Image: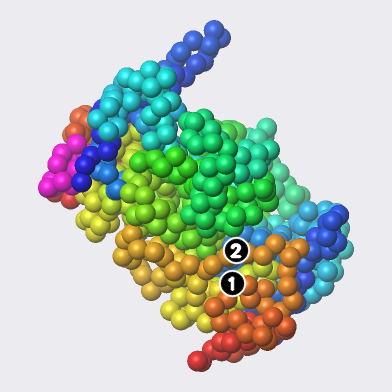
Amino acid sequence: MTEILRVENLIKYFPVHGGFWGREIGRVHAVNDVSFSLKSSETLGIVGESGCGKSTLGRTLLRLYEADSGKVYFKNQNLLDLSKRDLRQMRRDFQMIFQDPNESLNSRQTVESILSEPLEIHGVGDRQSRKEVVKSLLAKVGLPESAGIRYPHEFSGGQRQRIGIARAIALSPSLIVCDEPVSALDVSIQSQVLNLLLKLQSEMQLSYIFIAHNLAVVRHISDRVAVMYLGEIVEITDADSIYSQPLHPYTKALISAVPTPDPSHTTERIVLKGDVPSPFDPPFGCAFHPRCPHAVDQCKREKPVMRDFNGHQVACHLAETL
Amino acid sequence: MDDQVVLRVSNLRVGFATEDHGMLVAVDGLSFDLRAGETLGLVGESGCGKSVTALSLLRLLPQPLGKILSGEILIKTKDGWEDIVRLPANQLSRIRGARISMIFQEPMTALNPVHTIGRQIFESFRLHFPEMSDKDILMKSLELLEDVGIPSPEKRIHEFPHQLSGGMRQRVVIAIALSADPDILVADEPTTALDVTIQAQILDLMLALQKKRGMSILLITHDLGVVAQMCQRTLVMYAGRLAEARDTRSLFKDPRHPYTKGLLHSIPRLGSVRKTLLPTIEGSVPALKDLLRGCRFQSRCPLVTERCREEIPEVQIKQDQNLACWNRGFHD
């Protein structure tokens, strides 16, 4: 399989202003030196807790935020080098699905005009053929043809997410960044939307970056999974190993903290002490060391580098011994 | 009545007055018991009536639209049973906080942003124990904050809610809820807004406090994982009515109601086969204004028959188990 996306040393920080003159007093490293690659028709899941930078990463990849440094090769072209005009041309090939379909759909537009807008912007077809495309998009995401003349508020949350998905696939992209696409949905609707994403992936050979905090959902839909903590990827490997043989203590704690929907399941939960530190002032050395049950002196002094164990990459000094 | 029962809800009907559709019934004919020291889970999807039920228990329904239409909410007090539904408004403060207390999903909205943590706990003690001295209240507050796992409480009481993390705020809310030592804690999605590692801390805390104080917890959640790990018994609601109420182990092992079954099958699990289509419940929950007569699950049910479209399923009762389905029994 060919590589569709390769990210090298991506950094995105947000300046923090304060004081009387509103000067920059520091920076929040939302995405700090992140590298990974994604193969065509594959799904990379990105998990982590709130504030770990997973959504910022998704947005920076698509240049919805401008990166501060690093490279994002999409089909061997560095997106960060593209001019605004070339970028707009490229955008039809990568799209995004957002968490809250209430906020990402314009409530004053009919569904038909929401779905034909990307086609108009990129000058695809004429009025009549666009109508046909919209019809087939609705069918693809499991909405009735009559949905076209209605407005977003007339639909349920699950149906609105289907509209968001239809808009994302309108231009037949190769890559879709899905930012918490099922988090706002009810349990019985989540599985419908996950199934739809799986179906579209195999029909259209889509590649997904799937960002979510629910580990079971991410594992189900992903081929590979990356775990983020305080702006950095701490572990990345295939979706089965990350659950069966997690190497990073944070990944282990994260997995053990997920309540299993099975009352007879009673493994010991690793309860982490304290909260995620502020990304404004991350701990020195390994960012996880203040909460890590295994931390040694080295973890406080030295930042662990990403090491590769047969394709299973992990950034922890103690990966072999734990 | 079973002397273990501390709260009995029977035939509760709660409605909301609307301009366009008249009175919409959000909870319809719900009955359940809560026993001493147990954790009872109340699960269901948005709009199933679980939060409305919780608010009714404390008579906190939004006024003037929400109304308890009929039914009883009996609570055990030292003078015998009292019906919360029929309690005059000026008597409610005897029940709220003191007998039955509530914590909410979003701790930030439950706390007052312009007062310090200390002042908000103080207020609660002052209300329930008017005779207590300021010094005693301060001591009690520090003790309580220590109990809910807030480090250096003597510093924290001078801080404002925005200075605390989400998990710490929820701990403060729990401390306030427990200040008058209630018998029953109603927890409405207490960990939904929190990250999993923080959720694990709060759930552990709730279990520890329950053990220490012997209180009963009514845990309202949409997360079947949380229910499985926390609750001895579970009540499943669908569109305002009870679907199934059983002990949690049997419910997860052998769900009887087609809705419960569909729900349990549709969640991805850490052990399932990846990238396969998940079983789904087709369609979506009907809006309260579009409810058909008969069973409310009929439009999504794989077992639907003519009878389901005509008649509301009778609740089958076997010991303390309940099941509302025409086509399924406890043994078939």
Tag shown at residue B284: 2
Nearer the observer, A264 or B172: A264
Task: Check the image and report above or below for A17 versus B143.
Answer: above
Secondary structure mostly seen in magenta is: loop
Question: Do tag 1 and tag 2 residues touch (Cβ < 8 Å)?
Answer: yes
Instruction: Determine if marks 1 and 2 fall on one subunit.
Output: yes
Task: Check the image and report above or below for B115 versus A18.
Answer: below
From the image, tell me which residue sits under label 1: B300
Classify mark 2: helix, strand or loop.
loop
Residue A206 locus on image (x, y percent): 35, 47
Chain letter for mark 1:
B
What amino acid is at disc 1? Arg
Check disc 1: other Cα within 10 Å, few if <14, some if 14-19, many if 20+: some
Q: Which residues are magenta?
A: A306-320
Nearer the observer, B133 or B9: B9
Whole-Å distance between the Cαs marked 1 and 2? 8 Å
